[in-house]
Structures are given as structure tokens and as C-alpha cells.
Amino acid sequence: MTKRVHNFSAGPGVLPVPVLEAIQHDMLALPQAGISVLEISHRSKWFIEIYQEAQANLRQLLNIPSNYHVLFLQGGANLQFSMVPLNLLRGQNAPADYIVTGSWSVKAVKEAQREGEVRVLWNGKDDKFVRVPKQTELTFNSDAAYVHFTSNETIQGVEFAVEPDAGEVPLVCDMSSDFMSRPLDVNRYGLIYAGAQKNAGPSGATIVIIRDDLLTKVPDNLHTMLDYRIHVKKESSYNTPPVFSVYVIMLMTRWLMNDIGGLAEIAKINHQKASLLYNLIDNSNGFYIGHAQADSRSLMNVSFNLQTPELEQAFLSEAAKHDLHTLKGHLSIGGIRASIYNAMPLESVQALRDFMIKFQTNH
Ligand SMILES: *Cc1c(COP(=O)(O)O)cnc(C)c1O
């Protein structure tokens, strides 16, 4: 096998080796079908089985109640920034409330504003997005069409430890970068969406979980492809779904269930991995400067700085020599970002930790 490096990419992110091996194994032909999943009809019984297993496994892993629909759409989380307000805000005669904790929630607000009034309940921008709000800092409006928040800000590396409690108002969440990283009480949400390429599979599919009663809010004049009701009715196959992505998501759910043992188990591992890096940052006497405040730290994206851009550049090039790759922080905040999603092995995080200790000693 060609050597694999430690891949800290923010997205598309690392996939588990057993999943990659399963893809490789079936690449020329799915055992029953005799053709590969890249060539398969989305109307074939083989794909329908894959689709149904992906959906059933997601329902089991996340304990999704029966009054929620699970969809596999395209267009990424970015399209959901628009589809959410198109379906749930247009024609509602009520504003939507947004919690702004980083770059992705800023983008979500921008699209929602095209459809109706947006109230920003809390904005971390002036603090450079170093934390998420506490429940006590949020005043919810019972008249809101919905409340939108981003559970994990992939760029800044701030994450909600628990979802905000918006009372009766439907809670809508962009969960792209921490979806399936921990157990979840889906009942607390009206709608969850997640681009698969961070924590759930490859790019090309966006998972949407929507509570059935919200479909009654959808206005009647939407374009077909933008209407959640169509995708529910057609089981995500109104148009050709991203068959390969759905297949890999299905393999990811199998891996989480069979190899890992469920979301409570992966959550433990994720805690362990993140602690390795945050403890090191905290004990580095200011050599490494964490971006997020301690109570808002992301278990998925560890963003930090060194004292100077020159030192950060040296860090990145020396890291690459140790097979530690894609650690450059997002352009908007600079510095270093280690994305340590579900599929990131503990050993890779240990390798990064060991390198960081050595780098500090040498500088
Ligand atoms: C990556 C990301 C997005 C954008 O996803 P696309 O699939 O590229 O549209 C949105 N929100 C969050 C939290 C992300 O991490």
C-alpha cells in the first residue's frame, strides 16, 4: 500500500482506512450487482438497498424519531443556507433568529436576509469569534420562524457543548463539522443539516434531518429542487442522487456501529484526542496560543497560533517533514488548525502532539 500521511484537513477530511479498503474491495463490482457503485443506477435495487441501509444506520446511531425525515441532498451546507429560509421563512410573517459564532454562521445569515427579516440574537464577531454564548446570554423570541445556530465553527474552532434551548421555536442547526461526533437528542431540533465531507463521508452529499410538521410551512411556489417536500416524497431521488457519496456514508455508519461501537464511544475517543492537544497548548507557557476560550473549544478543529507568522511557517514546513499535513489555518484567521474528525486515528494526534513538544523545545 502507498504510504498514508497524517491528514489534518478541515474538509474533505480523513476517512477511516477500513472504509477506504471496503471501497477498494468493491470498486470493480459490488458483489451482488456485478457493477461498481460508480456505475450503478439510482433506481436499481442495489442502490436502493445502500440508500436504505445508510438511512437505517443513521436512524439507529442518532436515535432519530419516526417523525423526522432523513434526506441526502446536494449543494453542500451552502445550499442549506438558502433552502432553510426559502422553506421555513418565506411567507411566514415572522423573523428568523440567528446565533452568529463564526464564519459559517455569518454566511448563513447573509442568505437568510434575502428571504426575510433576520434577528441576530448573539454575535461573537467583536470578540473575534473566540467563544459561543451561554444559554443565559440568549433571549429567544417566541414569535421567531426558527432559531439557527452552528454547532461547530470549523474555521474558528468553537463548538457548543450542548445545543441552546430555544423553547418551542424550531431549532435549526448547521452540524456540518461535528455531525455524528457525539450522541445527540434529535428531538430538540426542527432541522439538522450537515455536508458529509467533514465527519460523515466524502463531499457531494448533504444530510438533512427534518421534523415532519415543518413541511407544512413550505410555501407552494418554490422551485422543485429547492422544496424539502419533494425530496421527502421522492426519497432524495427526484433527481440523480450522489450515489457514491451515499454509499460511502453508509460504510461510515457501518464503521461507527461495528468497529467503534456507536456515538457514545466515538465521543470518548474524540475527547481523548482533543485533550491531548489542548493540554499541550495550556502547558506550553504561551508558546502555543489557542484561539478558542476553554469552555468553547471544539473537539473537531483545534485552531491555534504561534507568536509570529514566521514561526508558524517554520512549524508548518517542519511538520510536513514529519508527515503531518494540511495544518495551515484558514486564510481568514491564519495560524494552525488541526482537524481531528471521527476518522482521525489517535496515533496521528499523538504524532502531532509529540512533534509540537519537540518543536517548542527546538525554538
Ligand atoms: C464546510 C462547512 C460548510 C460549507 O460546506 P459546503 O459543503 O462546502 O457547502 C458550512 N458550514 C460548516 C460548519 C462547515 O464546516
Image: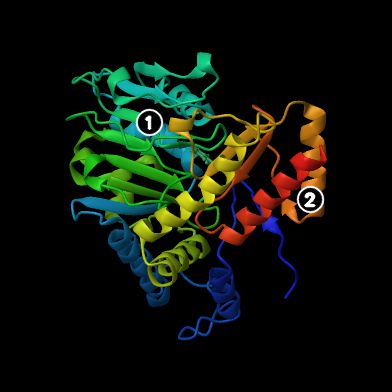
User: Does the image show residue 51?
Assistant: yes
Report which quarter residue 150 is drawn in.
top left
Q: Residue at x 22, y 34 (%)?
A: 217
Residue 254 place in picture, x, y as percent: 41, 69
User: Does the image show residue 205?
Assistant: no
Residue labelled with disc 2: 320
Q: Residues within 10 Å of mark 2 (few under 14, many from 20)?
A: some
Q: Residue at x 33, y 38 (%)?
A: 162
Q: Quadrant of the C terminus?
A: top right
Residue labelled with disc 1: 149
Nearer-N-terminus badge (1/2): 1
Dot 1 beta carbon under 8 Å from ligand 1: no
In the displayed structure, would residue 264 be above or below residue 208?
A: below
Q: Please, what is the three-letter code of the amino acid marked with disc 2? A: Ala
Report which quarter residue 189 is drawn in.
top left
Tag in front: 1 or 2: 2
Q: Residues within 10 Å of mark 1 (few under 14, many from 20)?
A: many
Q: CA distance from mark 1 to mark 2?
A: 35 Å
Question: Are circles 1 and 2 on residues that touch, CB within 8 Å?
Answer: no
Residue 281 place in picture, x, y as percent: 61, 37
Of the pair 303 and 248, the residue shown nearer to us: 303
Q: Please, what is the three-letter code of the amino acid marked with disc 1? A: Phe
Q: Give the colour scheme shown.
A: rainbow
Q: Is residue 346 left or right of residue 196?
A: right
Dot 1 falls on a residue whose secondary structure is strand
Residue 11 place in picture, x, y as percent: 59, 47
Q: Quadrant of the N terminus?
A: bottom right
Q: Residue at x 19, y 56 (%)?
A: 66
In the displayed structure, would residue 288 be above or below residue 54?
A: above
